[in-house]
Image (cartoon, rainbow, N blue to C red):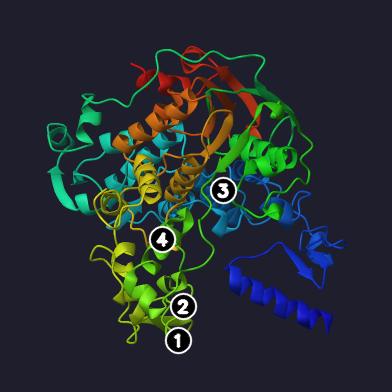
Amino acid sequence: MFFHDMQKHVTSKHIRHNSMDKEIDLWGIKAAHVICPKCKGSGLGAQAIHTTLSGKTITELENMYIDELLDFFINHRDALPGKNLIGEIIIKLQCMIDVGLHHLALSRQVPTLSGGEIQRLFLASFIIAEMDSIIFIFDEPTIGLHEAEKESLINIIQNLVKRGNTVVAVEHDENFMLAADYIIDLGPDAGIYGGERIFQGSLQEFKLCNTSRTAPYLTGTNIVRFKNSYKLVDNQKLLTIAHANLHNLRDVTVSIPLGLMVGIAGVSGSGKSSLIHDTLVPKLKQLLKNKLVHEVDDDDISLMMNEASVTGTALIKKCIVVDQKPIGRSKTSCPATYTGITDRVRVMFAKKPEAIENGYGAGLFTVNSEGGCRTCKGEGFKSYYIGFGNSIEVECDMCSGTGYVEEALSVTIDGKNIKDIMAMSVTEAAEFFGRNESEAYDKSISDILATLIRVGMGYITLGQKTPTISGGEAQRIKLAKELCKQTGSGNVYILDEPTTGLSLYDTDRLIELMQQLVDAGNTIIVTEHDPAVLANCDYMIEMGPGGGSDGGYVLARGTPKELTSNKNSIIGKYLKRVQI
């Protein structure tokens, strides 16, 4: 009976939160996941545990980094059975390394991979097949790659073309564009101000295009801003991580100067995330308690096996962690609900004379409460199962796809009902709510929308469903939300590749925003691959030298200018190109 009730409890929680909860509270009893004492967490039966290849079980091989696994098979190929099979395994592992996946393990779950990693895994499978006459369509394949790894990926993609394939790539990376044979530029801006074909043709012709936002950056007419002078390190204001050994870190001790923009660089799998997001953030959560803002459940931040120590936290007023995890838990959540805009808009609607006259409360103007269509539960469509694991979505005939009941749509502000407002882009909404003379004027909403525009999110709609928002977009929406709440100095912002999905023009604007935060007396700790962002840091910490088992050391530290002349630095030569 106990387990039957537990199963029902867990299932209902999964449905409510659309996620897996790591801890179950049943009748006040904490029922947490524990490692199986018999298999020690391997999941293997007794026979499988005692079956090994050169002393390694199948689980041990699956948990090795791909570059380590390749070395294992190369070194033991003569001692292992199945020469042809071993040869095939070596070829496949080499292809995965070639596309920049050396830092992964075969046991890594696909849902935990980034969009760029999934694309490169897909690409590796086609390289192995050696196919031709195929059209490949990629969506920003360079996401999450170090500059040195991008060069390798560009070579692989060019080889696909030489073999007789066609590659279409949506990409913001400057070097990727410079390697292209043909360019199509859309714009001129984003959202309602975009959607036009600005240019199509060769790279050389594109460089002469005067109407493009991107072309001036490729010719050098416009350059992403970079610093010539750096804020000095105050040795009395240091946040120190000591003896970090998590994952592939090798007893790392490093100090992060406060009051500066600090860049964390290194190739994929070099230990950047292990140092900052898996070591520093959990420790800060433990030490700062409610002074740390991180939108995950407590049990999402594991302190297990984290033996590092962190000092200098007394100097931090508040710490804001802005990562790429999805925003919103329900399918009907959107940027407007996440940033708090919806709450103010609902109250605005409820105060209208026709709403008061009919007794309409604020709850009527949201699909998550009274205003949601009774038939489709506010989703605007109904799903019908058609067999074989498939279903189709059909527009709800009761609400005509709006998701709202008729009463909610009958009230308007300045000629717009709640559905019209949620369909506005951030840029449109900023104009709508920012006019002093209109009944829609609201300074708080206007300020939030202005901040979203500053972080390059002017093109998204207020009601865009959060599952359609990328990791980079989610991070910038989180940053905008926190910027609206946090003021003054002494705050620490921890960012994880904030330029993901940004054009060169928008990257320039984001750097300007980050610099304003630092000038106000705050600290930015940014994990990043983009040399343009790293060149604007006052201080850098580079991890490496390689990924996986070849990483975990502090390779170099200092100002970007110091790293350009540091022979140990890998990012140094790319910083030099940006600073010319």
Q: Nearer the viewer, mark 2 or mark 4?
A: 2
Label 3 vs label 4, nearer the camera: 4
State the separation of the CA atoms marked 2 and 4.
25 Å
Look at the picture and state if 75 lies above or below 561: below
Nearer the camera: disc 1 or disc 2: 2
Q: Measured along the vertical axis of the image, is residue 388 above or below residue 421?
A: below
Q: Which residue is mark 3?
A: 90
How far is disc 1 from disc 4 in space, using C-alphas? Answer: 22 Å
Tell me the residue at 60%/45% (across/down): 66
Q: Secondary structure at mark 4?
A: helix
For the residues labelled 2 and 3, the Cα–Cα distance comes to 59 Å
Q: Which mark is residue 385?
A: 1
**SS assignment at label 2:** loop
User: Which residue bears the numbered disc 4?
Assistant: 468
Which of disc 4 and disc 1 is earlier in sequence? 1
Q: Is residue 313 left or right of 342 when viewed as pictured?
A: right
Specify whether 361 is left or right of 159.
right
- Residue furthest to the right in view is 37
Q: Amino acid at mark 1?
A: Tyr
Q: Quadrant of residue 305?
A: top right
